[in-house]
């Protein structure tokens, strides 16, 4: 996208959208994780999950959309960047982890495996975030 390379505010504005999406995604996943670990036991899991996962999905949509636009403006540089490659791999792992969490009905069980999968999710997303910051310095 040429506008991202020529307009002085376009790319920074897109980065703000990306960061806002990350905040929505991670903030809501951590909120749900706290509930899975037993905090806020008065909050019904199903209702909290419905709200938190909906907002997290909106955040993920913002991240994907803004990320694809940023990627399109510097494809070759990003494909050669190891931090970017690792970030993409970690996102795939986080998606697989989320799939495993939901396919096994972890929100209904709230057992040790559910807690382990939630913890893995948070660690993976924090690693994604770290790699995202590292991209600029590689």
Image (spheres, rainbow, N blue to C red):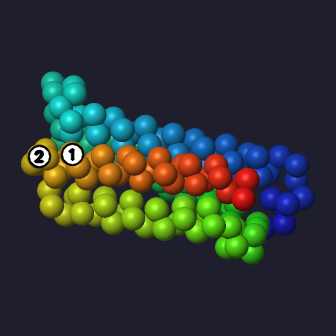
Q: Is residue 59 visible?
A: no
Whether residues under marks 1 and 2 lie with C-beta atoms below 8 angstroms apart, the answer is yes
The residue shown at (42%, 53%) is 124
> At which x and y percent is residue 109?
9, 48
* SS for dot 2: loop
Pointer 1: what residue?
A: 115
Compared with residue 85, is residue 53 higher up or lower down, i.e. above or below?
above
Compared with residue 14, is residue 97 higher up or lower down, i.e. above or below?
below
- The answer to whether residue 13 is left or right of residue 38 is right
Q: Quadrant of the C terminus?
A: bottom right
- The answer to whether residue 80 is left or right of residue 27 is right
> At which x and y percent is residue 97?
31, 61
The residue shown at (23%, 57%) is 101
The residue shown at (18%, 50%) is 114
Compared with residue 73, is residue 17 higher up or lower down, i.e. above or below?
above
The residue shown at (28%, 48%) is 118
- The answer to whether residue 64 is left or right of residue 74 is left
- Nearest the eye: 63 or 3: 63
> At which x and y percent is residue 63?
55, 54
* SS for dot 1: helix
Residue 111, label in figure: 2
Distance of label 1 from label 2 (alpha carbons)? 6 Å
Q: Answer few, some or many: residues within 10 Å of disc 2's Cα (few below 14, many 20 plus, some between 14 and 19).
A: few
């Amino acid at each position: 996208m040429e506008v991202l390379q020529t307009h002085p505010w376009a790319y920074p504005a897109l980065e703000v959208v990306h960061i806002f999406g990350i905040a929505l995604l991670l903030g809501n996943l951590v909120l749900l994780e706290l509930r899975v670990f037993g905090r806020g036991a008065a909050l019904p899991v199903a209702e909290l999950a419905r709200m938190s996962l909906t907002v997290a999905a909106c955040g993920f949509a913002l991240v994907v959309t803004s990320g694809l636009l940023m990627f399109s403006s510097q494809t070759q540089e990003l494909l050669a960047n190891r931090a970017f490659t690792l970030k993409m791999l970690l996102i795939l792992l986080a998606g697989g982890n989320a799939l495993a969490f939901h396919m096994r009905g972890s929100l209904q069980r709230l057992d040790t495996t559910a807690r382990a999968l939630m913890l893995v999710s948070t660690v993976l997303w924090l690693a994604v975030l770290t790699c995202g910051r590292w991209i600029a310095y590689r």
